Image (cartoon, rainbow, N blue to C red):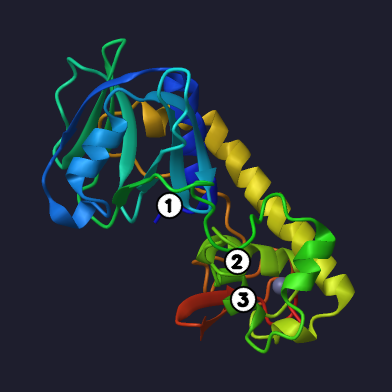
Amino acid sequence: MPELPEVETVANGVDARVRGQKIVRVWTSGKPQTFKSPETEIVETLTGAKIERVRRVGKSIVMDLGRGKTAVGAQFLVHLGMTGRLLVSQAEVPLPPHTHAVLSLADGREVRFVDPRRFGRLSVVTSEGGYQGPGVEPTTVTAEEFAGLFKGRKLAIKAALLNQSILHGVGNIYADESLFRAGIRPLKQAGKLTRVELLKLHTALQQVLAHAIELGGSSVSDYVDADGVRGFFQLEHKVYSRSGEACLDCGTGLKKIVVGGRTTVYCPVCQR
Ligand SMILES: [Zn+2]
């Protein structure tokens, strides 16, 4: 499941390749599961529009669209789901299996949405103000604002980090990794964290995300230019999916618990 850094990598990669291009034709597969907006609306909104910018909002890829001199403010939203991929290809490259949308560009290239398991979602937003996404953006939230988000919250800090209405885009891997780096137990009540702990967590979360985005940036062509199926890059995990293995800092066996329905791994010695 692509998390925030992977989504950002793809969004930046697509942006660098197609910004300023005009969409001349749109094809959709007709598989209803994939389309959150009616396909006819997606085709109408995208055809003839100029791609002003491609960026990440939460875990979604947002394509800002304009029409000539008068930007209409419409947006094309891509949620990658489990296996979704957004590729930029030359038109003569055969369509990969499970292609659900093709945006033909004026210069002859195509933006293709490929998704074997079909948990990905495509939609258009035409409302005033555009798509904002729920919650606060974790990569830019200030320490003060971050600390304020958890005041009085009775749920476990791990569950709070995953709650998309509080912070958008933080998934299981980066929640576990940042809690380990901050030395905080995942089950600790969010509202009971001290100011020092919250500041440590803020720093840890932003460092982990920034590092992962950096890693992704160096391998972006694998995700955007490739036509085959390739896995996403992986941050070197200190705790995530390492249950039972030795803590890299103190050697203690890492423990696995379930918090908010999600598998959670932590070090019982380093995290208090
Ligand atoms: Zn440890």
Residue for badge 1: 2
- Viewer-nearest residue: 38 or 256: 38
**Which secondary structure, mark 1?**
loop
Task: Check disc 1 and give the amino acid type.
Answer: Pro
The image's mark for residue 24 is none
Which residue is located at x 32 percent, y 41 percent? 85
Task: Check disc 2 and give the amino acid type.
Answer: Ala
Residue 261 placed where, x, y %? 45, 82
Q: Is residue 233 visible?
A: no
**Which secondary structure, mark 2?**
helix
- Quadrant location, ligand no. 1: bottom right
First in sequence: mark 3 or mark 1? Answer: 1
First in sequence: mark 2 or mark 1? Answer: 1
**Which secondary structure, mark 3?**
helix
Side (left or right) of 190 relative to 50: right
- Would you say the beta carbon of the disc 2 residue lies within 8 angstroms of ligand 1? no
The 10 Å Cα crowd at callout 2, few under 14, some 14 to 19, many 20 or more, is many
Residue for badge 3: 160
Residue 192 placed where, x, y %? 78, 86
Side (left or right) of 209 relative to 36: right
The Cα–Cα distance between marks 2 and 1, rounded to whole angstroms, is: 14 Å
Dividing the picture into quarters, in which one does residue 104 lie? Answer: top left
First in sequence: mark 3 or mark 2? Answer: 3
Q: Is residue 176 visible?
A: yes
Side (left or right) of 96 relative to 54: left
The image's mark for residue 175 is 2
Residue 241 placed where, x, y %? 49, 66
Which residue is located at x 88 percent, y 72 percent? 196
The 10 Å Cα crowd at callout 3, few under 14, some 14 to 19, many 20 or more, is many
Which residue is located at x 52 percent, y 66 percent? 172
